Amino acid sequence: MKQLVLNIPESEYRFFLKVIKNFPFVEVDEKKNKLLELEGKLTPANRKIWGSIKEGLKEVELIEQGKMKAKSAKEFLNEL
């Protein structure tokens, strides 16, 4: 499945969403849309913090999948 990112004017967003949902081959990810909308409202400083949090969560997923080695608390503290 392919993904497509569109920028729609706020005034036309609801209309466009109603139209696009009528196509049987289109899947709308409401959670992702809401998250992107909220991310867009962050200040630059908060966006940087949020980016770091997301990066950390991706690392946790990789560790859980065995694709990345976890650090011990001692290793973590030594980095500080």
Image (tube, helix red, strand yellow):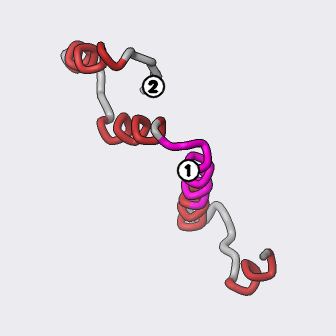
As drawn, the label of residue 3 is: 2
Q: Where is residue 22 in the image (x, y as percent from the top left)?
A: 19, 16
Q: In which quarter of the image is residue 71?
A: bottom right
Q: Quadrant of residue 68?
A: bottom right
In the picture, the quarter occupied by the C terminus is bottom right
- Please tell me which residue is depicted at 34% across the width and 38% down the height of the picture: 34
Q: Are marks 1 and 2 in contact (CB under 8 Å)?
A: no
- The amino acid type found where label 1 is placed reads Asn
Q: Where is residue 2 in the image (x, y as percent from the top left)?
A: 45, 24
Q: Over which residues does the magenta segment extend?
A: 42-56
Q: Position of residue 70 (x, y in %)?
A: 66, 73
Decide: is 19 above or below 31: above
Decide: is 73 above or below 1: below
Q: Is the magenta stretch mostly helix, strand or loop?
A: helix
Q: Where is residue 76 in the image (x, y as percent from the top left)?
A: 72, 78
- Verify whether residue 51 appears in magenta: yes
In the picture, the quarter occupied by the N terminus is top left
Question: Is residue 61 found left or right of 78 in the rendered image?
Answer: left
Give the Cα distance between marks 1 and 2.
27 Å
